[in-house]
Structure formats: C-alpha cells, structure tokens
Image: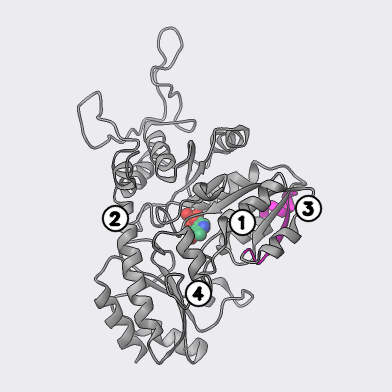
C-alpha cells in the first residue's frame, strides 16, 4: 500500500502516449472521433459526458480519499446539489444547522421547494441526530469541523445512526482533505469544494463527489453530472489535479501553522476564545485527535469588545488578506457575521482565519500588532 504523498503525486497520471509529455496535456476538444465501426477509441465521445482531464482528476480524487469512484463538478455547491438531486421528492435529509451557508441556502431555497424534507439540527449532539431520524430519512449530511465555529462531529457515530436507519452518511470534507478520511470512518460519500484546499491557490472553482462504491446511488450522481451538466472545464480539472499533487505536504504545513497561531492567539489578553480543534482547550479535542491527523488550517477567534473591535482588528492586518474563501497559500481573515448576515447565529466578535503557508511567526506578529 503506497503512502498518501506518493498516491497524491501519481494518481490519475500517465505519460502522454502521443508525445511522451510528462505533464498532462489539456484536451480542449469538445468532441471525439468515432472509429469506422462506430466505437470510440478511448471511450470519450463528447466532453460534457467525459473527457481526459476530468477522468484523470476523478481518478486522483478517488485514490486520495480511498474511494472507488468520483464525479467532478464545476463548483463545490454543484457537487452538493448533485448528491441531493440523487434523492427523490418526499425523501428526508438531516443536515447541520451550522453548515457552509451556501449548503443551507441550497437546501432551503431549492431542495425543499422541490420536495425534499430537511431537518436542521446540532449535528455534534448524537441524541439530536437519533431523534431526528424518520421512516423517510435517506441521508445525513455532516460538515466537520463546522463553519465558522469549528464544532466537531463524530463521523463514525453518525454513520452508524444513518446505516441503522437505512440511510447514507455524506461528509462535506472541504475543510480537511488528507487530514480527515471520512470513508475510513464509515461515511458513504465525500463531497469537496475543490476551490479550497485541493485547488489550493485561489485560482479555480470546482467540486467533487467521491464514493465508497460504484453502486446505484453513485450511478445516479453520475447521471446528474452528465445530464444536469454542471461540469468543470478541462483546464479547471487540470488546475485542480495539479493542486492535488502537493496537497499532503500543504495540509501538513497548514495544520502546523494553524496550531502555532491558535496557541499564541489563545494567550493574547484581547482574545476571548479561540476555536481550533487542535487546542487542548477545545471541547472536542479528543474526538478530533481520533478522527483527524492534524487539524487543518481553519480557525476562528473571538475578539474582546464584540463587533466593532473585531472589525477594527481585521482592518489593521498587513499580511493577512481580508477576503472570504479558504485553503490557498495566502492567509485570509474575515468578519464572518458581515458575510452571513444579521439573521445567522455567527457571533459578532468572531474573526475566521484561513491560515496559509507563510512563516507562522510572521502571521503571529501580524495578528499581535493588529490586536494590540
Ligand atoms: C466553499 C465551500 C462550499 C461550496 O463550494 P463552491 O466551490 O464555492 O461552490 C461547500 N462547502 C464548504 C465547507 C465550503 O467551504
């Protein structure tokens, strides 16, 4: 069994048979020639259905997550939508109240009017999960650690509840690729916004669904991919796969940097609390240590003085960039309540950080001068 660094470098890679090129060519062709007998030489006929760059990316993602198959999409939310579209009107979904706000919006504004029943709960409370199950429950959605308060959900325990109910468990693993392998803990599907850590450089939008098996459910997702048509371009697939090559090393560095920054923030007199599962003070530190190997680069901290104080800190940073999104080489900081709107439960003093690949000491000094 090869190690993850080796898998990430080689999965989905082959030397171009036409030229011997080591770096994969980008195949922009939207259509492929039929042989005289009507067949297709490599199985490609039309690029919405399949193309070489997408297939390579899907092979790479399946290998890295330890799945059997994968389907790539034009965005993370398109990947999530494909999972929900594989259900039928009347089916019941259990989803976390604290999830990526676009996922909540997708469920509320599109999936529920279309006929899915959805119950939003605190997914970290296993009694609430068990109590939410109905005869129609078909899918339980996990996002761990959560956005933006870094609450940790027990993937194995929720998967057991799902399977006992005849439902599947899906994990949005966007925040923790490599360091968290949901399929090993019992999940059936993993969803990623590849816009984040996997692309890794804030220069491409994409998504992927990785499946434990190539079963009927996955075939429905494949149908939504080709027939719904929210597919990524060959160039976007090429960029995401290039990001995947360095992902294990980047995740290690993101995790190390974030732990150093979190530890210093926790000791700062103007910081009320730091949400980072790698800290011993985090309420789910032990669970995180069991199901994660490094805690990724996302953390939130609560500035003393609430909204005004938090916005003032974000205004004073020099290295951190004030922007939404995450997972790139550059560190980002965001007053999350301003993004999610007044109605959301995001605390007003919370600043969310995507810790990048700068030197940790420079990031620590930058936050210290902004906080002082
Ligand atoms: C960004 C994000 C998404 C949505 O991905 P897009 O590529 O923006 O469509 C979904 N889930 C999580 C956790 C995310 O951070």
Residue 239 in the image: above or below residue 295? above
Mark 3, mark 4: which one is toward the viewer? 3
Q: In the rendered structure, are the residues bearing label 4 and label 1 in contact, judged by CB atoms less than 8 Å apart?
A: no
- Specify the label residue 336 is tagged with: 4
Residue at image mark 2:
249
Asked whether residue 117 is drawn in magenta, I would say yes
Image location of residue 254, percent across then percent down: 33, 64
Image location of residue 242, percent across then percent down: 30, 46
Determine which quarter of the picture holds residue 125: bottom right
Residue at image mark 3:
134
Q: Secondary structure at mark 3?
A: loop
Residue 155 or residue 272, whichever sits in front: 155
Residue 361 in the image: above or below residue 27? below
- Residue drawn 61% across the image and 56% down it: 157
- Residue drawn 34% across the image and 48% down it: 244
Say whether residue 180 is left or right of residue 119: left
Q: In the rendered structure, are the residues bearing label 2 and label 3 in contact, judged by CB atoms less than 8 Å apart?
A: no
Q: In the rendered structure, are the residues bearing label 3 and label 1 in contact, judged by CB atoms less than 8 Å apart?
A: no
Mark 3, mark 1: which one is toward the viewer? 1
Say whether residue 17 is left or right of residue 138: left
| Earlier residue among tags 2 and 4 | 2
| Earlier residue among tags 3 and 4 | 3
Q: Residues within 10 Å of mark 2 (few under 14, many from 20)?
A: few
- Residue drawn 44% across the image and 49% down it: 206
Say whether residue 200 is left or right of residue 221: left
């Amino acid at each position: 069994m090869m190690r993850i660094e080796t898998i990430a470098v080689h999965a989905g890679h082959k030397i171009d048979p036409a030229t011997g090129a080591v770096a994969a060519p980008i195949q922009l062709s939207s259509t492929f020639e039929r042989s005289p007998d009507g067949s297709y030489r490599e199985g490609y006929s039309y690029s919405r259905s399949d193309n070489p760059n997408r297939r390579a990316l899907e092979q790479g993602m399946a290998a890295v997550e330890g799945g059997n198959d994968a389907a790539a999409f034009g965005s993370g939310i398109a990947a999530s939508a494909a999972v929900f579209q594989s259900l039928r009107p009347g089916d019941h979904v259990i989803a976390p109240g604290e999830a990526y706000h676009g996922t909540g919006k997708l469920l509320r504004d599109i999936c529920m009017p279309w006929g899915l029943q959805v119950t939003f709960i605190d997914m970290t409370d296993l009694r609430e999960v068990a109590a939410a199950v109905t005869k129609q429950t078909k899918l339980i959605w996990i996002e761990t650690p959560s956005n933006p308060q870094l609450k940790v959900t027990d993937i194995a325990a929720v998967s057991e509840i799902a399977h006992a109910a005849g439902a599947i468990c899906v994990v949005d693993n966007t925040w923790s690729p490599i360091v968290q392998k949901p399929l090993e803990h019992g999940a059936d599907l993993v969803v990623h916004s590849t816009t984040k850590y996997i692309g890794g450089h804030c220069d491409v939008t994409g998504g992927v669904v990785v499946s434990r098996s190539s079963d009927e459910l996955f075939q429905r997702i494949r149908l939504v991919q080709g027939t719904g048509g929210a597919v990524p371009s060959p160039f976007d697939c090429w960029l995401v796969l290039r990001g995947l090559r360095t992902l294990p090393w980047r995740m290690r560095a993101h995790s190390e940097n974030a732990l150093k920054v979190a530890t210093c923030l926790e000791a700062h007199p103007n910081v009320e609390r730091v949400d980072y599962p790698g800290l011993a003070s985090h309420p789910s530190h032990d669970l995180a240590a069991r199901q994660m190997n490094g805690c990724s680069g996302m953390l939130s901290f609560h500035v003393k003085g609430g909204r005004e104080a938090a916005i003032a800190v974000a205004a004073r940073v020099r290295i951190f960039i004030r922007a939404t999104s995450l997972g790139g080489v550059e560190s980002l900081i965001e007053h999350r309540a301003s993004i999610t709107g007044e109605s959301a439960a995001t605390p007003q003093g919370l600043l969310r950080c995507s810790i990048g690949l700068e030197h940790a000491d420079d990031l620590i000094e930058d936050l210290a001068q902004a906080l002082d």
